[in-house]
Image (spheres, grey):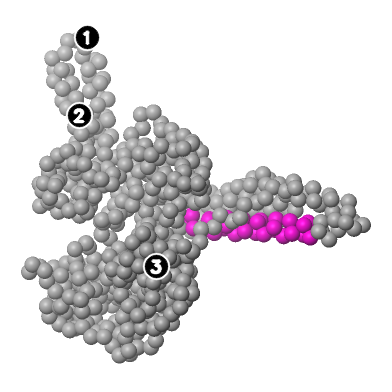
Amino acid sequence: MSVLLNVEGIRKYFGPEPVLDGAGFEIRAGQHVALVGPNGAGKTTLFRILTGEVEPDAGSVTYQPGAKCGVLEQHPEFKHETLWEEAFSALEPLLKLQEEAERLAKELGQARESEYEAIASRLDRLHAELEQQDAYQLDHRVEKVLEGLQFTRDTFKQRVETLSGGQQNRLLLAKLLLESPDLMFLDEPSNHLDVEATVWLEEFLRKSSSAILLISHDRYLLDNVANRTLELFQGTIDSYPGNYSKYLRLKAERVEIERKTYNRQKSEIEKLEDFVRRHHHGQKHAQAEDRRKKLERIELVAPPREITSPVMGFADASRTGDIVLRVERIEKSFSDEPLFEKLTFDLLRGEKWGILGPNGSGKTTLLKCLLGQLPCDQGRVSLGQGVKVGYFDQQLQCVPDNVDAEEAVRPEHRATVEVERRNLLARFGITGDMAFQSVNQLSGGERNRVALAKLAGSDANFLILDEPTNHLDLWARQALEAAVSNFTGSVLFVSHDRYFINEVADHLIVVGGDGRFQVIEGNYETFKNLEASGLAREATHASQSKKTVSPKSGRQDEPTKPAKRKRKFPYRKVEELEAEIAACEDKVGHLHEQLASPDILRNGERIKQAQEELSSEQVRLASLYEHWEEAMELN
């Protein structure tokens, strides 16, 4: 595969410390690459350098000559009147090819004999290119992309300036997908998309022949689209094969090796220093001097390249009655359009319920009705005995923005001292001077964590959360998932993060619009499995009583025969693979022994070489294990 983009030694300063400090990588044709790193690591800065918006202070960015690159723009600038015309303009190069083909066809009919062969040859090449790019069904391509991104047909002729901000951003994404450039830069492409549109985008990108560089906080998207992962941390980039989940596994293995290597060298240095200190002026002075010189020659191993996340956590919840929330046949409409009708369910102590549905289906409205912030048109909502609600709103109005963070988390129900409030903030990653910054000066992610800290200090036993993962990086999301999952009280939440829903929820309310809803026992994967099997297609309508769909309920059709697994690897004998696995395992063991050797620990270059070789062998070994499992099943 040809190299489309080569990045070498990029440095960028916005202060005394570099944001990027020698970052480098390459992207080849057709690769789908995820760029991950904690908030503030410089991912967006790197994107802006790659797309020419910002000049690096050092380093180079080189594109393959003639490579066509496309960027998901953040600021809409439209040149056409309607949604359809603007989307269709992305296919202008293909329209020009069609026009040229039509012109050549006319010329061919009037060509002299001496010109005929040249024109016919050019026309054949044009037809082949148009065929390859599927340029004979352009209307269908535009319709497919617009509908996939949740534009209805009645909006196709809508004037661009009348579109909402979210719709305009979706139109920019549609244009980029239709352009189908050699290399796409996508920075949070699922923003402004609901779950259904994100699933469609995921599948579109997975099948795309374009190379992709993708920034996203959606872990399903990263897993299903990326086949390589770049980690940006402390100004430099490490590359890992595979998707996000594989990156996490390989990263953990690499950090463990780095930690052991670092600790071994540290221990070795401490022993040498202790010997020098004790014998510098004694009978073993010569040996001490020899060890002092060895210390001077040692190349220090860098500490483990470990990305840490805030601990996060909620205190043990006080006990409530068995029923925490009872919802009885509630209804709510806006402009005579029903959001939900006769919605009925009981949320029991310790349960964690998620609310799922398309944009505009009334998820946040439902939360506000349950909280009593909006009146229901019909029905009744009641809290159980001893229930104390803690509410996290996605606009973060739950924290005042005109006070510092330490003051913002002060509980209203009890007195606290400053050190308690600072410890509470630190648990959610707000440390040092950040605790004394005004909330309105903090970033979105920092404000989010202040709001979560305030919630943790409220001693609530029933958490109601509206998009709690907004503005959080991947590591903070993982910490929040653990905190909410381990919370001993009850939880009701809205989220567009499918991974968070899947990890936390044990029940789902799926709001479908037009008053329809489903109550499902299980998480997001349960819902998708039910949907695939047809059990989730019949959404509960307002006129029906409460209905809970679970994998164990509903009439099952005659089971279908599972499809035979397809080969991922070429055919090889099991015995051959087992021999290669044994040799690879021996090599990994030998490399571990090398990294434990004091001679190696004194040589930074040899340590680096051994670590790289070990990482490569571990990746190869993981692939061999997969190949062996496939051979055992299919041979």
Amino acid, disc 3: Ala
Spatial separation of the CA atoms under disc 3 and disc 1: 82 Å
Secondary element at tag 2: helix
Q: Position of residue 462 (x, y in %)?
A: 33, 80
Q: Position of residue 170 (x, y in %)?
A: 23, 50
**Res 445 → quadrant:** bottom left
Instruction: Identify the disc placed on residue 96.
Output: 2
Spatial separation of the CA atoms under disc 2 and disc 1: 26 Å
Amino acid, disc 2: Lys
Horizontal arrangement in the rendering, residue 172 relative to residue 563 (left or right): left
Q: Are marks 3 and 2 in contact (CB under 8 Å)?
A: no
Instruction: State which mark lies toward you, 3 or 1.
Output: 3
Against 99, is 259 above or below? below
- Label 3: few (<14), some (14–19) or many (≥20) C-alpha neighbours in 10 Å: many
Amino acid, disc 1: Ser
The residue stretch that appears in magenta = 246-274
Instruction: Identify the disc placed on residue 114.
Output: 1
Earlier in the chain: of badge 3 and badge 2, it is 2
Residue 618 included in the magenta stretch of the image: no
